[in-house]
Image (cartoon, helix red, strand yellow):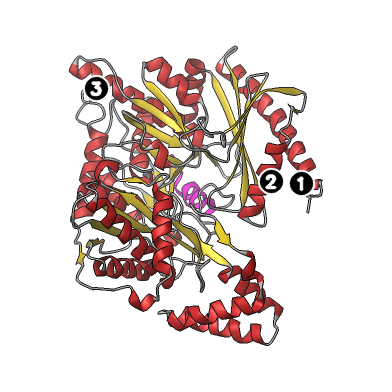
Amino acid sequence: MGHLAGDASALNPEHLITAATAWAEQDIDPATQRETTHLVALARAGDAAAIASLHAAFSGRLAFGTAGLRGPLGAGPLRMNRVVVAQTSAGFAAYLWERAQSGEAESPPSIVIGFDGRVNSDVFARDTAEIMAGAGIRVFLLPEPGPTPLTAFAVRHLRVSAGVMITASHNPPRDNGYKVYLGDQDAGSQIVPPVDGIIADRIARAASRPLSELPRKTDYTVLGSGVADAYVSETAAALLAGFPEAPETPGLPRAASQNLSITYTAMHGVGSDIARRVFTSAGLPAVTVVPEQDRPDGAFPTVDFPNPEEPGALDLAFRVARGGSADLVVAHDPDADRLAIAVPDSADPNGYRRLTGNQLGLLLGWRAAERAWARAEHTGSEPAGALACTIVSSPALRAVAKEYGLDYAETLSGFKWVSRVPGLIFGFEEALGYLTHPDTVRDKDGISASADAIALVRELAAEGRTVWDLLDEASERFGHFASSQITLRLESMAAATALAARIRQEPPQFFGDVSVDQVQDLLVPGLAEVPADVLRFDLSDGARVMIRPSGTEPKLKVYLDTFSDAGSAAERRDAAEAALARLDAAVRKTLAALLAEPTSA
């Protein structure tokens, strides 16, 4: 995802007023046009707040990065609006033509466009379709709001040159975004450097022209239900094919309980209908929805942040689950590319405890390894494939891969990297992202992952066991990996980057009483796929600390990992968790000291 770009000249109020006036003259959206002209009038009268608002919206451009664009709705080049979307689409179209002319893609290029239920997502999708069609691209527009995994699937299913998904995923309500996929040799994955920089250059060229010079056409194809139907059938088939020797009960390698009670929330997003279709097609139990959150609503009225990771986001789901004594809570984020599950826990005040992304990643990765072995036994071959996770995710998956004789890879954060691991059979990131069936979708997919999770819990129920029992078994088999995260919310993405730079300049030699054995700065070329703003600290007791600024929000993220393989599962868990608590306190103390220090001018 891109950062905010600007220049010093934009700080001048007269410059801002001139830029905003020119923007308003070409704005095709009456609402943002009125917003701009109102701010200009106030700024000309010397209103300091209006000048500050103009600076926030007109002092640079929302930059295009590897995940496209994401930002707040509003007028100006630093916001998500119809002008920015049109310019971005024109630049992306130019890039697609260059690929076609070089033989990297079909000619004429083609694209599929999807959109979620956020404010203006449908408008931005139509603008994208019209600009792409005006540039001579063959355009296919999905017919209604849908999940991000559906658009990622459509790129491969339709064999098009590219895809665009209008979504801001789990961002705050007033955000939106523009996510890009490439087809052909990229096989429906997100873009990676240096492609993002090339596209950004083409967008800048398009933005230098008057908006009226960007041709538009309406002769694009609005698709029917066929893509969604194919996604449902292929996702269900992938789940059923996972264990070739399985009994007749769909989706399961063992006998199953048919009485599993499941509470499901779409978090005011677009996942509900298609997820339930997948569950039904795979022979999984019906779910009880959280009614207040089951339909798309861009205002997200029942949650402060529409992200299952955020405190309070699952409160309504827990209420419904308690009322029905549910065995499992399943939650998608608004575009259904992320998954959270929670299971009963009498020690938790809610009655349910959400698994961390690392815990569910371990279980689903273990399940993928079992699938690989089942396939190998069925065909008389050796198990093959790779398990992968991001560098800030728990290293537990490495132990699973070693146990099952599979390849293992750690990538930079983002499924643009995970999805490109050779031979991938499963990938995950700790931020609730899972790729359980890479042959179907080359991006994180909360819907297919939730089907796998439901099947897993149903198998355990049939055996009289719980998810907590399975996690104990994992601790006994692979060792216990404890993980946590510290998130510092800062005033801007630039502030998060600046804090990471300060840590880089004077890296800690100790966290508490534990010394740092090795520091790796992934900005150094050769240590990662591309240089990345990530610092890794390996400690003398085997613990690990990873620090990086968020690529999408004004946060500094710190990831902590500890490990124990001594004693019983309970002893291993206690030892690793105690070490994690000590490490957490030490890291927080270090960060607090940094924040208390005055920064140099």
Region in magenta? 313-328
Give the amino acid at mark 2: Leu
Disc on the earlier residue, 1 or 2: 2
Magenta span has 314? yes
Q: Residues within 10 Å of mark 1 (few under 14, many from 20)?
A: few
Q: CA distance from mark 3 to mark 1?
A: 53 Å
Mark 1 vs mark 2: give the one in front: 2
Q: Are marks 1 and 2 in contact (CB under 8 Å)?
A: yes
Badge number at residue 255? none
Residue under label 1: 595
Name the secondary structure under disc 1.
helix
Q: Quadrant of residue 10?
A: bottom right
Locate residue 221, reporting x and y percent.
Answer: 19, 65
Using the image as rendered, state which of residue 435 and residue 553 is in the foreground: 553
Vertically, is 422 above or below 37? above
> Residue 271 location in percent, x, y?
36, 54
Judged left or right of residue 8, residue 68 is: left
Q: Nearer the viewer, residue 379 or 156?
A: 156
Give SS at disc 2.
Answer: helix
- The residue where tag 3 is placed is 375
